[in-house]
Amino acid sequence: MGIAKQIAANKKNWDDRVPIHVGSTNYDLTGFIADPALIRPVIEFASKELGDVRGKSLLHLQCHIGTDTLSWARLGADVTGLDFSPKAIAAAKKLSREAKTPGRFVVSDVYAAPSVLRKRYDVVYTGVGALCWLPDIRKWARVVARCLKLGGVFYVHDVHPIALAASDNLGPEGPRFANPYFEVPKAVMYDDPKTYAGDGVLKHPRSYEWNHGLGEMVTALIDAGLTLEWLREHRELSWVRWPGMVEKRPGWWVLPKGAVDVPLEFSIKATKVVRR
């Protein structure tokens, strides 16, 4: 199956997830609407690393149903969220209205973002669980650069490729590897009728993912005209990757005692210094 058909299958898969996620306690849209000061935990973490976004235009690539995007809005940013799922964008727009938190939401494939948006931003943000759905990391980096103003900042916080290369079963010493660490043309296929948040069965359970090595990501961003400010690796994970993980603090999990010490998430901050 070609990449276009794989992405089309992923789109159907993510469309199916939307109503389940909207009704889940994990996303807790009711609480988000009721409390105008509520910020999603991953955005609390990201904001400490990224810094003040008040008054800045911010583009969130692969925004899903908008909870993280609107958390940035509550921190003072002028936000735009982009996602390839029409159902996700419809849910994000509804959440924006009901939460009385302004944000613009656009349906688009990530790779088409520059031509669809026709705008450059002070900040481009990519969050947890996003990059594995993209087949070409170098093309993605060029999109990031084209969407940034000169002097603008890019920030990504995502699952570490080591965690994604591991199997779904955690051994007594820690992760065991089953998938490619580096980007390869062949996607890893999954058939899973369940999703990570909420109860429900997906009508389209098949999905395809691609991993990207940390060096590949950094090099792609540099080649696209960005200057790396820092790269950080983190021992905590913002979701339960394996059964048996231990909740260290609300919303953050670590490997169990005795497991080998490996990074589970990473974050990168970079600045656009070349006009492209």
Image: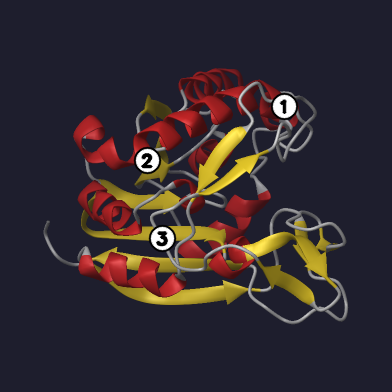
Q: Where, quadrant-wise, is the N terminus in this rendering?
A: top left
Amino acid on which disc 2 is placed: Ile
Q: Where is residue 87 in the image (x, y as percent from the top left)?
A: 52, 20
Amino acid on which disc 1 is placed: Ala
Q: Position of residue 122 (x, y in %)?
A: 30, 51
Task: Please report the residue visible at 59 percent of the width from the left and 34 percent of the height from the top.
Answer: 206
Please say if the residues under marks 1 and 2 sit with CB atoms less than 8 Å apart: no
> Mark 2 Cα within 10 Å, few/some/many (few <14, many 20+)?
some
- The number of discs equals 3
- Side (left or right) of 48 relative to 3: right
User: Is residue 84 in sight in this rendering?
Assistant: no
Q: Which residue sits furthest front?
A: 1
- Side (left or right) of 27 relative to 79: right
Q: Quadrant of residue 116?
A: top left
The CA span between labels 2 and 3 is 12 Å
The CA span between labels 3 and 1 is 44 Å
- Side (left or right) of 69 relative to 18: left
Front: mark 3 or 1 = 3
Q: In which quarter of the image is residue 270?
A: bottom left
Q: Which mark is residue 3?
A: 2
User: Is residue 249 in sight in this rendering?
Assistant: yes
Q: Which residue is nearer to you in this view: 65 or 189? A: 189
Which residue bears the numbered disc 1? 34
Q: Where, quadrant-wise, is the C terminus in this rendering?
A: bottom left
The CA span between labels 1 and 2 is 41 Å
Q: Position of residue 108 (x, y in %)?
A: 35, 30
When the figure is inspected, residue 86 is found, relative to residue 161, above or below; the finding is above
